[in-house]
Image: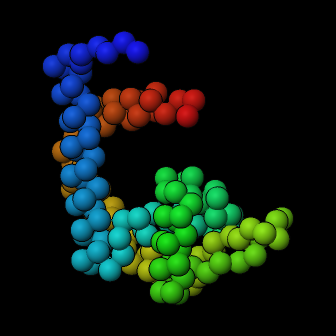
Amino acid sequence: MLHVQLTAEELAAWTGFLRAHGQIVSGLDEELRREHDLPLSSYDVLTQLESAPGAEIRMSELAEAVLLSRSGLTRLVDRLERQGLLERRECPEDARGFNAALTELGIERLREARATHRDGVRRLYLNRLDPAEQARLAGVWARLLEGT
């Protein structure tokens, strides 16, 4: 395997991305925990469920959507189920599988947290960029995600 040094500009682009991502995600997580006792990972699961047909999705699809391992998702779903925010249901297409479904309480909690999350995204990320920078970044992210 060829080991090639990164240029200073390449390294700055990479480490800048990592640090900015970490700082923004940490800030959003902290605000959601403080204001709604809802970690960002839980908020993400609830939004994925809300956008699924019938507010229900197979556990394997949910794990891919939120970028968690199956075991990590299982632990998170266990917590959210104990809190009454979602429920597990038998999968009609596969008797061995389960779906996660958003409950009324989950919908309510998500609605309460949505404004906090959106305000945080604007304050910690979008407001720090002008519209041209936002458009350029949107294009960059789309290009990086092509074919994934």
- Residue pictured at 71% horizontal, 78% vertical: 89
Tally of numbered tags = 0
Q: Nearer the viewer, residue 31 or 11?
A: 11
Residue 141 occupies which quadrant of the picture? top left
2 sits left or right of 88 in the view: left
Q: Nearer the viewer, residue 21 or 115?
A: 21
Instruction: Name the outermost residue toward the front.
Output: 1
Measured as percent of width and height from the top left, residue 102 is found at 59, 76
Measured as percent of width and height from the top left, residue 138 is found at 39, 35
The quarter in which the C terminus is drawn is top right
Q: Nearer the viewer, residue 88 or 85?
A: 88
Q: How is the image coloured?
A: rainbow
Q: Would residue 66 be seen by someone viewing this image from the given angle?
A: no
Residue 120 occupies which quadrant of the picture? bottom left
Measured as percent of width and height from the top left, residue 130 is found at 22, 38
Q: Would residue 136 be seen by someone viewing this image from the given angle?
A: yes
- Residue pictured at 24% horizontal, 69% vertical: 31
Picture layout, residue 1 above or below residue 77: above
Q: Nearer the viewer, residue 52 or 66?
A: 66
Picture layout, residue 38 above or below residue 23: below
Measured as percent of width and height from the top left, residue 26 is found at 25, 59
- Residue pictured at 78% horizontal, 69% vertical: 96
The quarter in which the N terminus is drawn is top left
